[in-house]
Amino acid sequence: MKSLTFKTTIKCAGCIEKVTPVLNALAGEENWKVDLQNPNRLLTVNAKDELQAGTIISGLQGVGYKAEEIA
């Protein structure tokens, strides 16, 4: 497993509802969280090694959100 972190445009609980199906499908339920208290709205994904950051970014773009991987 690896941990991926993204700066996102996810802003509220309603946004989380929209991204939940995508993130659950990509990373699995309970393998991701969004810190809405952080000004960068950090998304942390505990991913299997084969899951790439680009896949998460594309999945979020598909439902109208932006994400940028941060180290």
Image: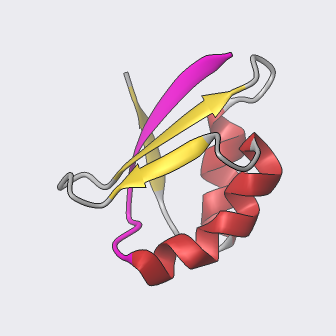
Q: Is residue 33 above or below residue 52?
A: below
| Residue 41 point in image, percent of width and height | 31, 55
Task: Judge from the rendering whether residue 58 lies leftward or rightward of residue 15; answer left or right.
Answer: right
Whether residue 64 is visible to the viewer of this picture, yes or no, is no
| Residue 70 point in image, percent of width and height | 37, 30
Give the camera-side residue of 4 and 34.
34
Instruction: Judge whether residue 60 is colored magenta.
Output: no
Name, please, the residue furthest toward the bottom.
14
In the rendered image, which quarter contains the N terminus? Answer: top right
Whether residue 23 is visible to the viewer of this picture, yes or no, is yes
Q: Which residues are magenta?
A: 1-12
Instruction: Judge whether residue 9 is colored magenta.
Output: yes
Task: Judge from the rendering whether residue 10 lies leftward or rightward of residue 31; answer left or right.
Answer: left
Q: Is residue 5 above or below residue 63?
A: above
Task: Judge from the rendering whether residue 47 lies leftward or rightward of residue 45; answer left or right.
Answer: right
Give the camera-side residue of 56 and 36.
36
Task: Judge from the rendering whether residue 54 lies leftward or rightward of residue 14; answer left or right.
Answer: right
Name, please, the residue furthest toward the front.
30
In the rendered image, which quarter contains the C terminus? Answer: top left
Q: How many marks?
A: 0
Colour convention of the picture:
secondary structure
Residue located 57% across and 37% down the image = 45
Residue located 61% across and 64% down the image = 61
| Residue 46 point in image, percent of width and height | 60, 30
Residue located 68% across and 54% down the image = 23
| Residue 63 point in image, percent of width and height | 65, 74
Give the camera-side residue of 38 and 65.
38
Residue located 21% across and 52% down the image = 38
Q: Is residue 18 above or below residue 42?
A: below
